[in-house]
Amino acid sequence: MTAWSDTPGATGQRADDSSGTDSIYDADTLADLSRRLEKFSRTEDPAALWPGLNDAERVGAALEIERVTRVVLGGSSSVGLDPQCVHSAYALAIAGHTTGIGPLLGRWIEDGVVSATPSVAKRFTEHLRHARLRAARIEREVLPAIDAMIARDLRPVMLKGFHTARRYFEEPAVRRMSDVDVLIPDDRERVAAAALEGAGFRVATRTTPTHKRDWIGPGVEDRVFSVELSDARTRWTLELHTSLDRRVEAGSVARLDAEREHLDWTELAGRRLAVLAPAPLLVVLACHCSEELGSSRLLRLVEIVRVIRTERAAGRLDWDEVLAILDRSGAARFAYPALTLAENLAPGTVDARALSLGERRSTWAAKHTTARLAPSGGSLDARGLIRQFMWTRGPRGLLQRFLRKVRPVSDRPQDVASRLRADVRRLRAGVLTLRAPDERNR
């Protein structure tokens, strides 16, 4: 855990080595982090991760970060972050972490686009410092795996962050990543596995999800080093995909694998690598953001806005092509929440036809949920049953989803017990409701 002296609940001192990464974590600091993570795994209570910071304070700070992001995306080159000092520096820093926008805010502060008080600027400078070290580390550690696959005549396609960070952001560090996604031909998974093993990688997942397996590199510690920022030493994985299809839940699949041949070639990290063409890239990013609404949502929306704006300006993104992919793949309803939020964040960015198609194809629960979402997210603790059923359609699907809810599939019985305890706690606290939480009413 990265320790700040005025962080509620933080302990320990930090010593920096010559590379700038945190080289010494004393026993008290590591023990405190372990206790936080263990308690959160039992309760799913955000207060366990950030003692002294309540969720309402973090949400308020996230809303301020969303405001600043709107202004910057609107073209301003000078905006103040929390100019009235309404929020604590710690709340803003944690909100920067949970929204995923911390390193990008750090870069905007460094460039003078955003101004902040010295204590707030210091927090986001630390976000950016770690992000730069982490981006350099991931690139250094993943390239042997990429080279090993190329040497075996595979054609690895770089998906999502490793590509978008280098094309659509000021520098790779400000589009933070926890994994590197690579697509390979579905009939060459064994060849790719042999290449990765030869590069020192090992399988990181006990079970194999459909079309995907996680790998972890040599020397990568299988742990988290901070819950306050994306620490340079926190683990990262290589996600090896054999299909572009996105299976949200049983019976809810975006059939995107037909788009895997729509590629571009580009220079990434000194190598000529394949990436998705703009139209399928946009659809994949939107589906991913909608599926993982609780993870770095604001950053993913900025990414979508920048992909659309950059490729439209270059004449490389045709909305008719995007609409065709959304229609034939069945992805329109899965992309709908993210595209709606991207348009909310940066009006005039998303074609109205894409929004209309997504709305027509969506379930009532998805439309109900989407109407109550905000770009920066809401409480990490609030739950709504309707939102949990937003992708489900048909009596059979509803029954399957309900049974999975009351009896979750898990390798460990203690995981099921933890979820039930967390739901009981939320019910007592009034944050477990039937309707989707209204993130706009803050």
Image (cartoon, helix red, strand yellow):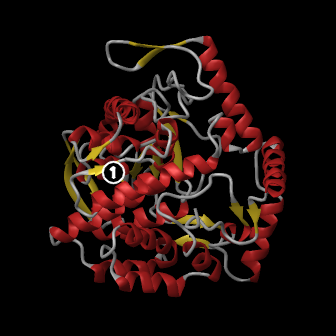
Residue 85: x and y in percent read 44, 43
Residue 218: x and y in percent read 45, 25
At 72% from the left edge and 32% from the top edge, which residue is drawn? 38
- Helix or strand or loop: what does disc 1 sit on? strand
- Compared across the picture, whether 318 is left or right of 189 comes to left
Q: Residue furthest front?
A: 84
- Compared across the picture, whether 30 is left or right of 13 comes to right
Q: Residues within 10 Å of mark 1 (few under 14, many from 20)?
A: many
Viewer can see residue 47: yes
Quadrant location of the C terminus?
bottom right
At 62% from the left edge and 36% from the top edge, which residue is drawn? 50
Residue 20 position by quadrant: top left
Viewer can see residue 154: no
Position of residue 26 relative to residue 141, above or below, is above
Depth order, front residue of 22/217: 22
Residue 362 position by quadrant: bottom right
Residue 207: x and y in percent read 65, 45
Position of residue 150 relative to residue 10, above or below, is below
Depth order, front residue of 375/83: 83
Q: How many marks?
A: 1
At 55% from the left edge and 34% from the top edge, which residue is drawn? 227
Circle 1 sits on which residue? 158
Q: Residue furthest left?
A: 314
At label 1, the amino acid type is Met
Residue 44: x and y in percent read 71, 45
Quadrant location of the N terminus?
top right
